[in-house]
Image: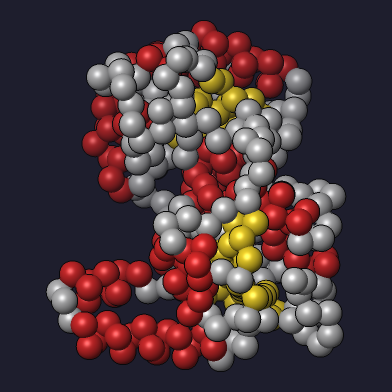
Amino acid sequence: MNIPEAGKPAILIVRLSAIGDVVFASPLIRALRLRYPAARISWLVQPECRALLEHHPGLDEVIVWPRGEWESLLKKRRWLALWRVIRQFRKTLHAYHFDMALDVHSLMKSGFLTWLSGAPQRIGLGSREGSQWLMTRVIDKGEDSKRIGSEYLRLAQVLGLPVNGFEMDVVLGDADDQFAGKLIDERDLQKGYAVICPFTTRPQKHWFEASWIELVPQLQQLGLQVVLLGGPGDREAAARIQAGVNGALTSLVGDTSLTQAAALIKHADLIIGVDTGLTHMGIAFKRPSICLFGSTCPYLDTTHDNAVVLYHKLDCSPCKRRPTCNGRFDCMRAITVNEVLDQARLLLSAGSGRR
């Protein structure tokens, strides 16, 4: 069951979200393009992740699934209207005449959209929630490898794609790089800055605010200004951290687009963050990165000498969405400020942190 060799095969990648997972799956674009240079390659994604893909030269289209509209109609029980928008989206997907669709999201929602594409070959990566019955083939994720993005590497290998240089690949637009350059000049960050990414969706993945507050002035003693990044929903927590250091950092939380934040990470001297998409971008851009993991441990092998994972495995690790510590989050508490600083000094002394 291989991609058709003749003509120009049309290939669809389905990874709807989240930011970090889209970044993890991004090496598939180059691998497919190398194997099938004449192919028409599209990616189906949710609106909030579109900007991560729309400038990638290896993609011909980024197709956006209007999730919000579908969910709104479903919530209001407007069944006829929902059926109509699904039918129209199906028509849109069928117009591409996909030969193959890769569901690397692996859930029922992504499986349904993969099936809706009309592709005669529908390959799921570890499909579950019943989505496996909508695939023509399911490829398991393999053993629990500690390599970053290991499941996507396995998929590429099974499909016979070239995997030399199989690395995350985020491409930004000129406007985002210009934004970062202007802000670096305006905030006098040219001598070096560290980006900290403390925020994500689950509290058990957070490092403690007191630890960030203790860390910031010590990063400044290393000659780095500190830039705090996050989304609009993180403003309140960001304000507490900023107040804790008497305003001695640049907070851009909620004030940048996703790709503008990515551009600041691309030009940073050091990135320190929890298990969140912005942190993973530091590795994608080959910037010195320190990743703080506890309740989740998606990888230990970053494949880069200038990116390290701090993770103290406990008997309950990883608990993922089901912590048993009654809110103590012992795994994250085990990561000390001194441990983070020691790693920061090592990375900076290696000379990998300067632009």
Q: How is the image coloured?
A: secondary structure
Name the one closer to the observer, 136 or 79: 136
Farthest left residue in view: 76
Q: Residue at x 83, y 67 (%)?
A: 35
Residue plotted at (48% across, 79% down): 116
In the displayed structure image, the side of residue 328 where residue 262 appears, left or right: right
How far across and how far down the image is residue 30, in percent? 75, 61
Q: Is residue 302 left or right of residue 15?
A: right
Residue 208 in the image: above or below residue 17: above
User: Hey, which quadrant is residue 136 in on the image?
Assistant: bottom right
Q: Is residue 272 visible?
A: no
Residue in front for this viewpoint, 35 or 280: 35
The structure residue drawn at horizontal position 70% and vertical position 63%, both measured from the top left corner, is 29
Q: Position of residue 319 (x, y in %)?
A: 40, 28
**Outermost residue toward the front?**
133
Q: Is residue 301 left or right of residue 228?
A: right
